[in-house]
Image (spheres, rainbow, N blue to C red):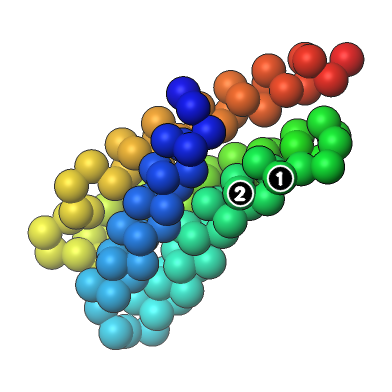
Amino acid sequence: MKGDELADRMVDFGAAALQLVEALPKTATGRHVSEQLMRCGTSCGANYEEGRGAESRGDFVHKLSVTHKELKESRYWLKLIVKSRLLSNGLPGDLLDECEELCAIIGKSVKTAKENEK
C-alpha cells in the first residue's frame, strides 16, 4: 500500500472517530470515552505523518510504533463503546473493521522496518 493512500485512510479514520465522539451521550461515561477516543483516534494519523517525514530509520520505527499503539488504543475504546452499548445503533459503518485493518498494516510495517534496521 502506498504511503499517500494510507495517509488518506488515517485522515478518514480520524474524521470518523471525531464524528463518533459527537454522537456519544453527554453523560460522565460518554464524556470520558469521548475524550479518550478523540485523543487516540486522531493522533494515529498525526504520528503516521511524522513517521513519513522521519529523519532516520530509528525515528521512522519509533513514530510508526506510536501510530500502532494509538490505533490499538482506539480499537479498545471502539470495542468498549460496542460492549457497553453507549450508542443505541452501534458503531457507524465498519469503523472497527477499518481500525483492525490499520492495526494490521501498521503492525506489519513496524515489523518490516525493524527487520530492515538490522
Residue designated by label 2: 49
**Neighbourhood count class around disc 1 (C-alpha, 10 Å): few under 14, some 14–19, many 20 upward:** few
Placement of 100 over or under 71, stated as above or below: above
Instruction: Tell which of 60 and 110 is nearer to you.
Output: 60
Please tell me the numbered disc located at residue 105: none
Q: Give the amino acid at mark 1.
A: Gly
Q: Give the amino acid at mark 2.
A: Glu
Picture coordinates of residue 39, whole percent (x, y): 53, 66
Q: Are marks 2 and 1 in contact (CB under 8 Å)?
A: yes
**Neighbourhood count class around disc 2 (C-alpha, 10 Å): few under 14, some 14–19, many 20 upward:** some
At numbered mark 2, what does the secondary structure look like: helix, strand or loop? helix
Q: Residue at x 82, y 31 (%)?
A: 57
Instruction: Tell which of 55 and 79 is nearer to you.
Output: 55
Q: Residue at x 55, y 51 (%)?
A: 44
Q: Which residue is drawn at 31% across and 36% down?
A: 97
Picture coordinates of residue 101, whole percent (x, y): 40, 31
Placement of 70 over or under 86, stated as above or below: above
Residue reaching furthest to the left: 89
